[in-house]
Image (cartoon, rainbow, N blue to C red):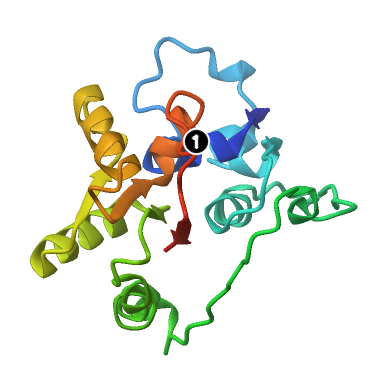
Amino acid sequence: LLIIDQADIYLMQNWEHVLHLMNHMNLLPLDSHGVDFSRVRMWSLNNWSKYYRQTLLFGALQDAQINSVFNKYCVNLQGQVAVRNVPLTGSISHVLVQLPHVFQRMEAENLASVIDSRFNFFVNKILPQYRDAVMSHTLIYVPSYFDFVRLRNYFKKEELNFTHICEYTQKSGVSRARHFFLKGEKQFLLLTERFHFYKSLMYPFHKVCNKIKV
């Protein structure tokens, strides 16, 4: 029996560790370690343990990487069952202050080009709308650290007035970046999703005028 609880939390850590563990589950040991083979079932010796393993996978949200683990590694011979709680109302209905929410749709030729297409769409279509000095206090929320690094390098190349915070930023760097952003000395703030996940209660951003999720 394998139980993966709060799988969405692992997404905020290193998902490669989860994949590494799943790739090494139920393999035949290289050494017998003095085991009594008369007590081992034949299906286990035939390396069929993964087809008899029961796997319970829990998560607070649906994600492509979690679904991939479910479809690829949960291969019990009795099949699969997926159950989800359907929310009665969307979370946006609980927002007390009325704020404009703008959703942009982009086109990509195939799945492999999504990352580049999203980056190009952002820097060519969305970012120019916020480069005016009037559009101050713009927080750019980046889920992927790789996208964060790419955007940071682009902002440096274009010499934009920005600062940045990620999960690897030291406390002094976080305080300095927050000070520059909240005082209006820096127009943009790049923020990673992992930093917000772990530090949102410690470092609230209450003076954000514009928020963009890349």
Q: In this view, does 169 lie to the left or right of 4?
A: left
Q: Quadrant of the N terminus?
A: top right
Q: In which quarter of the image is the C terminus?
A: bottom left
Residue 174 falls in which quadrant of the image? top left
Residue 83 location (% of width, % of height): 82, 49
Q: Residue at x 46, y 49 (%)?
A: 208
Query: Does residue 116 appear anywhere in the picture?
Result: no
Q: Is residue 39 left or right of residue 165?
A: right
Where is 120 relative to 67, above or below?
below
Where is 103 relative to 92, above or below?
below
Q: Which of 37 and 81 is in front in this view?
A: 81
Residue 169 location (% of width, % of height): 23, 32
Q: Residue at x 64, y 30 (%)?
A: 5
Q: Residue at x 66, y 53 (%)?
A: 62
Q: Going by the picture, which residue comes out furthest to the top? A: 34
Q: Which of 75 and 147 is in front in this view?
A: 147
At numbered mark 1, what does the secondary structure look like: helix, strand or loop? helix
Q: Name the residue under label 1.
A: 10
Q: Which of 175 and 199 is in front in this view?
A: 175
Query: Does residue 4 appear anywhere in the picture?
Result: yes
How many numbered marks does the figure carry?
1
Q: Badge 1, how many Cα within 10 Å: few under 14, some, many 20+?
A: some
Q: What residue type is labelled 1?
A: Tyr
Q: In this view, does 136 lie to the left or right of 73?
A: left
Q: Going by the picture, which residue comes out furthest to the right? A: 88
Q: Residue at x 62, y 66 (%)?
A: 100
Residue 182 location (% of width, % of height): 35, 41
Residue 132 location (% of width, % of height): 30, 72
